[in-house]
Image (cartoon, rainbow, N blue to C red):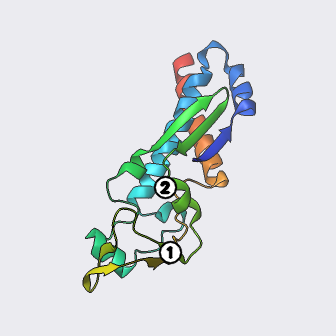
Amino acid sequence: MSIAVRIEAKKLTARMSKLGKKFKRRQLLEMIGREQWEWVQKNFKSQGKLIGGWRSLRPNTVAAKGHRRILFNTGELQKSFRYTIFGATVRVRSDSDIAPFHEFGTKGPYPIFPRRAQMLSFITTQGRVFRPFVMHPGLPRRKMLPTKAIAEKLAVRSMRKYIKKVTRAAR
């Protein structure tokens, strides 16, 4: 399962082709993809503030992790985002198995049972505890991808930058 935001650029690239040989569709789509990807990276660094902010971690989660950074343990989730180009479409996506759970949230509570042991062992604000199972409260929605409106705004900004670049080169 993956999550993605998709920008359809057929009309845009058709208009741009009027610039003649200077226009390179692939270059424009690369700029759009890079801008979208950079937005996702900035959103992670700002802890979701680019899209309303992410709910803070619960005290037990902070105790277990040893820090307050949201959606960051190893950095793999943030690194999993890529942009791809298919025809006139740019997609920014993550193929991480956990990305959809954070992007959309999960319903809770739900039980967690040990897989390889008799008991779960974890750190809380009271120290280490052992339990035969726990009821997880569910994950809040933490948007990592831009909304469609934000993605379109970023695409228009990329297009304007590209037009300036191409028209300067055409002079």
x and y, in percent, of residue 38 in the image: 45, 45
Q: Which residue is mark 1?
A: 111
Q: Secondary structure at mark 2?
A: loop
Q: Nearer the viewer, residue 14 or 80?
A: 80
Q: Nearer the viewer, residue 152 or 97?
A: 97
The amino acid type, in three-letter code, at marker 1 is Pro
Left or right, 115 with respect to 93, comes to: left
Residue at image x 73%, y 27%?
15
Residue at image x 53%, y 23%?
168
Q: Is residue 15 above or below residue 135?
A: above
- Mark 1 vs mark 2, foreground winner is 1
Residue at image x 50%, y 61%?
50
- For the question of whether residue 67 can be seen, the reply is no
x and y, in percent, of residue 62 in the image: 32, 74
Binning the other alpha carbons within 10 Å of mark 1 as few (below 14), some (14 to 19) or many (20 upward) gives few
Binning the other alpha carbons within 10 Å of mark 2 as few (below 14), some (14 to 19) or many (20 upward) gives few
x and y, in percent, of residue 8 in the image: 70, 37
Q: Secondary structure at mark 1?
A: strand
Q: Which mark is residue 98?
A: 2
x and y, in percent, of residue 152 in the image: 65, 46
Q: Is residue 151 above or below residue 162?
A: below
Residue at image x 52%, y 73%?
138
The amino acid type, in three-letter code, at marker 2 is Ile
Residue 127 position by quadrant: bottom left
Residue 44 position by quadrant: bottom left
